[in-house]
Image (tube, rainbow, N blue to C red):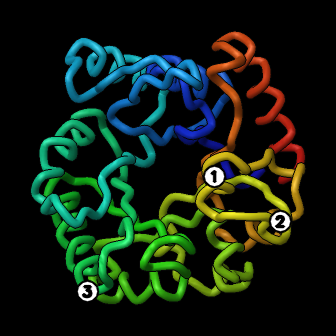
């Protein structure tokens, strides 16, 4: 398979960061995406944890990443805000940098377009100051909705300062076709999120993006063409809506082993 796999945070929602990293390593994956904290969720059964506040957990996470030979491919949760300036994210970026994160990922969160462009440009500068890449994720429910609009942001910031996070669900729901990816400079494609879905949206996109992501091969998206259009060797982060907290870690491990095997078989 020309593309290694990673495990994005949504796929293991409800797990702690150590279990996430160790599980990805056991399955031969190459990266994880991760935020800095998880709030407790009563209905989902999620336990709270924080890499911001728990120095011991940060040290354990660093050790787990090193033991598994993994990196945080995308640091999540640093997004546009109408009430917080970009500089308020400096402490979080410092933590991600200490954890060896490769790329900071961000979304505009509905900011007015000019504000969004300037906000993302400043975040990109801050990431670069810490020797991390910066990736922007477009979505049909954000201000910057399509690949074309994301490329306008790239032009504003500078191609050497930002890449585009391409989420298969957002990409196709925004009207994207695989040949658009094949025509891009390989360096413009940063993080890639992989999931499946029905060919046509069945309801609200935000709800589908959170709870309706299917295992590759279970839906109707043209994932073979999508993956073939990507630069060879690009890591594909599995970003799925799986009931991890309900399963428990051991059952989730068995389930994800099957999911990874099915994905590799589909894309072989």
Residue located 31% across and 58% down the image: 79
Give neighbour class at mark 1: few <14, some 14-19, many 20+ (Cα, 10 Å).
Answer: many
Residue located 80% across and 35% down the image: 259
**Circle 3/circle 2 CB separation < 8 Å:** no
Nearest to viewer (mark 2 / mark 1): 2
Label 2 and label 1: CA atoms lie apart by 15 Å
Residue located 24% across and 12% down the image: 56
In percent of width and height, residue 191 lies at 51, 58
Give the quadrant of residue 100.
Answer: top left
Q: Is residue 157 above or below residue 36?
A: below
127 and 54: which one is in front? 54
Would you name the residue on which mark 3 appears?
114
226 and 117: which one is in front? 117
Give neighbour class at mark 2: few <14, some 14-19, many 20+ (Cα, 10 Å).
Answer: many
Q: Is residue 24 above or below residue 218?
A: above
Nearest to viewer (mark 3 / mark 2): 3
Secondary structure state at the residue bearing disc 1 = strand
Q: How many marks?
A: 3
Would you name the residue on which mark 1 appears?
236
**Circle 2/circle 1 CB separation < 8 Å:** no
Between discs 1 and 3, the one toward the N terminus: 3
Decide if residue 58 is on the left or right side of residue 189.
left
In percent of width and height, residue 77 lies at 35, 48
In percent of width and height, residue 262 lies at 86, 39
Give neighbour class at mark 3: few <14, some 14-19, many 20+ (Cα, 10 Å).
Answer: few
In percent of width and height, residue 200 lies at 82, 71
Label 1 and label 3: CA atoms lie apart by 31 Å
Residue located 33% across and 14% down the image: 60
47 and 253: which one is in front? 47
Would you name the residue on which mark 2 appears?
221
Give the quadrant of residue 151.
Answer: bottom left
């Amino acid at each position: 398979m020309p593309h290694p796999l990673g495990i994005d945070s949504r796929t293991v929602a409800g797990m702690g960061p150590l279990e996430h990293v160790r599980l990805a390593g056991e399955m031969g994956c190459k990266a994880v995406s991760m935020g800095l904290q998880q709030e407790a969720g009563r209905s989902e059964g999620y336990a709270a944890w924080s890499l911001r506040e728990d120095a011991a957990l940060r040290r354990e996470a660093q050790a787990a990443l090193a033991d598994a030979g993994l990196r945080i491919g995308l640091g999540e949760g640093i997004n546009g805000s109408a009430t917080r300036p970009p500089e308020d994210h400096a402490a979080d970026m410092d933590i991600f940098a200490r954890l060896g994160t490769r790329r900071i990922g961000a979304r505009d969160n509905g900011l007015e377009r000019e504000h969004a462009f300037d906000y993302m440009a400043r975040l990109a500068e801050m990431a670069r100051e810490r020797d991390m890449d910066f990736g922007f994720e477009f979505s049909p429910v954000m201000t910057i909705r399509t690949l074309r609009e994301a490329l306008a942001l790239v032009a504003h910031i500078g191609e050497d300062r930002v890449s585009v996070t391409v989420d298969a669900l957002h990409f196709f729901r925004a009207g994207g076709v695989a040949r658009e990816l094949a025509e891009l400079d390989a360096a413009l494609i940063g993080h890639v999120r992989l999931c499946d879905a029905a060919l046509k949206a069945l309801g609200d996109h935000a709800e589908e993006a959170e709870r309706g992501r299917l295992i590759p091969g279970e839906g109707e998206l043209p994932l073979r063409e999508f993956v073939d259009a990507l630069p060879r060797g690009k890591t594909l982060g599995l970003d799925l809506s799986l009931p991890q907290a309900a399963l428990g870690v051991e059952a989730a491990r068995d389930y994800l082993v099957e999911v990874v095997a099915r994905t590799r078989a589909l894309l072989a």
